[in-house]
Amino acid sequence: MSKKMPLEGIRVLEMGNFVAAPFAGKIMAEFGAEVIKVEEPISGDPLRSWRIMYGHSSIWWYVQARNKKSITVNLRNTKGQQIIRQLIPKVDVVLENFKPGTLEKWGLGYEELKRINPSIIMTRISGYGQTGPYRDKAGFGSVAEAIGGLRYLTGYPDRPPVRVGIAIGDLVAGLYAVIGTLMALHVRKTDKEKKGQLVDVALYESVFSLLEGALPEYVLSGVVRERTGSTLPGVAPSNTYECKDGKHVVIGGNSDNIFQRLMRVIGRTDIASDPKYANNQGRAENAEFIDQAIEEWTKQHTLEEVLKALDQASVPAGPIYSIRDIVNDLQYKERDMLLPVTLENGIDCLFPGIVPKLSGTPGQMKWIGPKLGEHNEEVYTRILGYSHQQLKELKAEGVI
């Protein structure tokens, strides 16, 4: 008997493209929610054609849309809009990332959907949120990373800001969308009237929330955090160091006890016993000197030798992995983070595992991203009671 999944019984209507809302939908689908993804009848989600292709869809699509059901609806068509309104009483959550005002233009805004189903939870992801002077500006994750303060801090001080190698702004917003949706579901469950609510996630705010103490630091001291490359300002030692074989190791020796152990490993008991370096404040003021001492040692040993010595001393350290390294790592394999899947034509592949791990009700991957409109018949006949003749007519009219 299979274990019940934590979001089993929750039905989500995903009306979003690209990354942010679909990433949130993916997580909910992995943990048991029935996620019905709405796509344009001909082209579908643009993510289907992003990056490396396999068959008619991108490999990224197969990962991002796993466990979802794909239906096609022309949202610009009045009959398509009516289909969505008919689905609203049948779902718990609407997840979308259109530009603010778009769904209102189609008669599918929150106020309209709330009248149809007072229990509906509508989770909206946009560049700048549903209110404010920037509300109507076009917003993408890359721009949110810039205006949210992250790009300013990423890279080296003598070079222009750079991006993180993934769509971090979209992904963080997707995580907040899941968090907000789960909180809204919990509130609705405990509310006598079972009222839903609006969850408003802004990309730039999601990024801004990651800036640690940068805001109060600036307000109280006037300090503006700057790009610092591989170092962690005000925390030492925490950096990337070159080894004898040209490889690099990341070492975090910034707690008092760990620092003592690290200094003993590298043979610098003189630094370990110096009261000047007994706490982080003193170490941070002399970070360059400490980093130099550490790298003098790492450059005398291979990466493997460095990691072995630091592991034995319980000093946090690790190599910088590429995806090739990840695929060959035993920890990833043991934790089921490299899930074997079979694509079309029997081709074997690996997909990222499920995060987080729940002991009693774990998430799972049931199927890879579906074909465009693969679940039209199932959803329209089972949930809305459409006849096959109605489906045939709607398809002929370009509605689905």
Image (cartoon, rainbow, N blue to C red):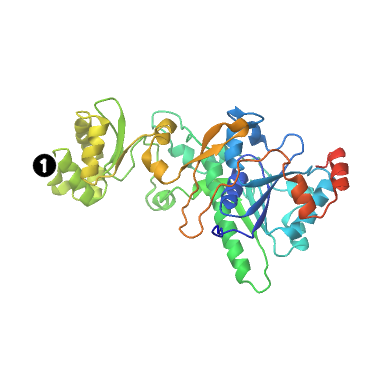
Q: Residue at x 49, y 42 (%)?
A: 149
Task: Return the x and y of residue 310 as percentages of the image width and height.
Answer: 23, 41
Q: Residue at x 61, y 47 (%)?
A: 67
Question: Quick one: quadrant of the C terminus?
Answer: top right
Q: Residue at x 73, y 41 (%)?
A: 373
In the picture, measured across the screen, residue 6 lies left or right of residue 322, that is right
In the picture, measured across the screen, residue 355 lies left or right of residue 238, that is right
Hey, what amino acid is under mark 1? Asp
Residue 350 or residue 22, whichever sits in front: 350
Task: Return the x and y of residue 37 as percentages of the image width and height.
Answer: 69, 46
In the picture, measured across the screen, residue 72 lies left or right of residue 1, that is right
Q: Is residue 342 above or below residue 119?
A: above
Residue 346 or residue 270, whichever sits in front: 346
The residue indicated by pointer 1 is 270
In the picture, measured across the screen, residue 342 lies left or right of residue 332, that is right
Crowd tier of the residue under label 1, counting other residues whose Cα lies within 10 Å: few below 14, some 14–19, many 20 or above: few
Residue 2's quadrant in the figure?
bottom right
Q: Is residue 44 above or below residue 15?
A: above
Total labels: the figure holds: 1
Question: Quick one: quadrant of the N terminus?
Answer: bottom right
Residue 382 or residue 311, whichever sits in front: 382
Q: Residue at x 60, y 71 (%)?
A: 190
Task: Return the x and y of residue 48 as percentages of the image width and height.
Answer: 65, 34
Secondary structure found at label 1:
helix
Residue most extreme to the front: 1
Look at the image and tell me whether residue 286 can be seen. Answer: no
Q: Is residue 234 above or below residue 156?
A: below
Residue most extreme to the bottom: 192
Look at the image and tell me whether residue 73 can be seen. Answer: yes
